[in-house]
Image (cartoon, rainbow, N blue to C red):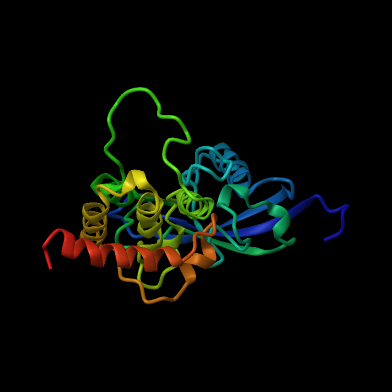
């Protein structure tokens, strides 16, 4: 594409499904004069405006901040969660990454634990259940402690912050052939297990969160590494190894093994 080509014509093959109980299908939608300056979600907005004018059902999709920090957006674009660009959410993907006359396939996350609500929207409340089971610390209420009252090495602090960057979008689940949520769970366990504030509840946290993950219907990890490849925040699978150690220790600490 030359610098003069600001608009492109594309064909969308988008998943349409009216409700969880209705069989879905791929629908072909022609989109003309799409600005290459648009984000992918802005492109969907533009297409929806045209569908509404034609008295047709707009494409339903999740979104909120459109800045890559909330984790609400997400769809499988040409077989890749969040699209072809690495370290990027769907709302950050721009149409300049596509070519004129491209055919683009857009589908929802595919996982038993993520039932489809409508079109590209899936129910990701299973991730909330995992967090509720142990992704927190119990602290005494009151004034904020001094920032330097608990010494933490820079290396540990950086590892905890890297894990805490997870936005819970679910791309790791959508990419995994087993629909595993272990990258998500390991990030949430790691960010607390690494810090002193998370030590008192570490054993119960790992036990509860891993078992809740299994109860929600997510699969197991077989080290395929697709999760790491598509994660928009580049969460490392090193966290999965840490989670496994924490879970193993939790069995002894809880006297459940």
In the picture, which quadrant includes the N terminus?
bottom right
Taking the spot 39% from the left edge, 57% from the top edge, the residue there is 184
Q: Picture coordinates of residue 36 (x, y %)?
A: 74, 50
Vertical position of residue 157 compared to residue 256: above or below: above
Which residue is drawn at the image coordinates 45% and 30% (left, top)? 146
Image position of 86 (left or right of 160): right
The C terminus: image quadrant: bottom left
For this view, does 124 lie left or right of residue 165? left
Q: Is residue 61 visible?
A: no
* Image position of 45 (left or right of 169): right
Query: Which residue is nearer to you in this view: 216 or 166?
Result: 166
Q: Nearer the viewer, residue 199 or 78?
A: 199
Horizontal side of 197 relative to 87 (left or right) equals left
**Location of residue 255 in the rendering, given as x and y in whole percent from the top left corner:** 11, 62
- What residue is drawn where x is 58% and y is 47%? 91
Position above or below: 153 against 172: above
> How far across and how far down the image is residue 109, in percent?
42, 59
Q: Quadrant of residue 141?
A: top left
């Amino acid at each position: 594409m030359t610098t003069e080509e600001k608009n492109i014509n594309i064909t969308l093959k988008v998943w349409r499904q009216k409700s969880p109980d209705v069989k879905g299908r791929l629908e072909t939608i022609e989109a003309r004069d799409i600005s290459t300056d648009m984000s992918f979600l802005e492109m969907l907005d533009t297409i929806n405006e045209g569908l509404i004018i034609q008295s047709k059902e707009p494409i339903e999709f999740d979104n909120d901040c459109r800045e890559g920090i909330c984790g609400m957006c997400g769809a499988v674009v040409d077989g890749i969660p969040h699209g072809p660009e690495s370290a990027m959410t769907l709302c950050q993907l721009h149409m300049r990454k596509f070519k004129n006359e491209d055919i683009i396939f857009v589908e929802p996350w595919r996982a038993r634990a993520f039932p489809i609500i409508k079109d590209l929207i899936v129910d990701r409340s299973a991730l909330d259940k995992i967090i509720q089971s142990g992704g927190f610390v119990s602290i005494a209420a009151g004034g904020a402690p001094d920032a330097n009252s608990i010494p933490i090495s820079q290396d540990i602090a950086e590892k905890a912050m890297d894990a805490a960057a997870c936005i819970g979008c679910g791309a790791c689940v959508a990419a995994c052939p087993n629909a595993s949520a272990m990258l998500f769970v390991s990030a949430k366990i790691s960010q607390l297990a690494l810090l002193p504030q998370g030590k008192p509840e570490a054993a119960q946290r790992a036990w509860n969160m891993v078992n809740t993950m299994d109860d929600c219907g997510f699969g197991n990890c077989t080290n395929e590494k697709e999760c790491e490849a598509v994660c928009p925040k580049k969460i490392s699978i090193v966290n999965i190894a840490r989670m496994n150690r924490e879970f193993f220790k939790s069995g002894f600490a809880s006297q459940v093994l």
